[in-house]
Amino acid sequence: MQNKKHRTRPHIQLRMIVMMAVSNLKFKRFRSFVTILGVVIGIGSIFLLISLGLGLQKLVQNEIIGNQSINTVDITSANSTIIALSPENLKQIKSIEHVTDVSGIYMLASQVTLDGSSVDLVAYGIDSLYLELSNLNLQAGRPLDTSKSDELVINSSLLEAVGIKDIKTAINKQININFSPEGEGSIDKKMRIVGVIDSGAGSEIFVSQKVFQQSNVVTFTQAKAVIDDRSSIADARHSIEGLGYETTSPVDTLDQINEVFRFFNLVLVGLGSIGMAIAVLGMLNTLTVSLLERTREIALMMAIGARPKDVRRLFTAEAIILSLTGGIFGMLLASGLGYAINLVLNQFAKDRGVVDGFSIFSTPPYLIISTLVFMVLIGVVVSFVPARRASRINPIEALRQE
């Protein structure tokens, strides 16, 4: 029992192994610097390209979907004469499982006259719920008060059509509206502009539902249902379609965007991986040369009691330090470069009249964490062969040859 204890070699503490690894890398400063620089360029290029892909994906999502709620379903009737979107039918839709609320929307072709110019457009009759759920990007004035029937919100395309360049001058102007509900005669109404939004290329106006209801318009053109959870959207749509309606959802658009950018991001990662592959070869070369140069040192370590496992851990530690250091500085370099590019692009856009700022790069926390984990794995994988060879050195044979 005592002999067995005498033969057992004490292990080298992890802290000591890390200190030895750092000391070894410092001994060949230039070689370590070049290796780390290769990793910085490799991981920096991948990080920058992935950030670009995620940033563009987020930018496109915000542009297309905007502020409208994802947990909604847009409802239309394939045949409004048979299955109408009446207030009673909206109550039936609201009673469906997972549907928490429903907003009906009136749509009617109309003609407006502003500053002596007439424009044909679409008028929307909405309620307060629709305002909460929809992407109405207010540029001037205030949101529509749906409790009032004498005010409206217009979009900037209408102002362009009538030749008004300064959108702020349109606020509080009087506008004449003419529309002809089905079964009713032509109706003229004078209203006041309270806000200007940026929506679509065509001219649009938004008024309270009361404007249509006072003109005996009962049937909604479409509706928007609020779903309690995104995972329940498919079930709710199936139930609504079972009543004979057609449905769409922002989730459809979001899924299409994500599918396109999933492929786009893979292409970007592939391009960045070329630089990373070169960096990995550089790390492997550094560790292999280090092994050849330190054969005597490793043999002495093993001769005085170091275990093969300790030698493997030493080389693995050196590889992880190289990869992690390069990864951290690579991410910092990529983030700084992305920030600078965003500044230049925003200034360029601002000089051309774009007011809202934007970012084409996105760096979510999970990207940083996954990159760090990836660099640790790279270090472990790259060090496997050199560490294995080092741990199999015969100290007697190695010292005899030296």
Image (tube, rainbow, N blue to C red):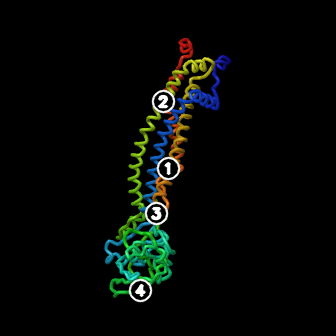
Name the residue tied to disc 1: 338
Graded by Cα atoms within 10 Å as few (under 14), some (14 to 19) or many (20 or more), the crowding at tag 4 reads few
Residue type highlighted by circle 4: Lys
Task: Look at the numbered disc 1 and give the secondary structure of its residue.
Answer: helix
User: Of 51 and 378, which appears nearest the observer?
Assistant: 51
Q: Are marks 4 and 3 in contact (CB under 8 Å)?
A: no
C-alpha gap between disc 4 and disc 2: 79 Å
* Image location (x, y in percent) of residue 113: 38, 82
Which label was assigned to residue 189? 4
Q: In this view, does 131 lie above or below 323?
A: below
C-alpha gap between disc 1 and disc 4: 52 Å
Q: Which of marks 4 and 3 is nearer the N terminus?
A: 4
Residue type highlighted by circle 2: Leu
Task: Look at the numbered disc 4 and give the secondary structure of its residue.
Answer: strand
Which label was assigned to residue 284? 2
Q: Quadrant of the N terminus?
A: top right
Q: Is residue 27 above or below residue 198?
A: above
Name the residue tied to disc 3: 354
**Furthest residue toward top:** 400
Q: Quadrant of the C terminus?
A: top right
Name the front one of labels 3 and 1: 3
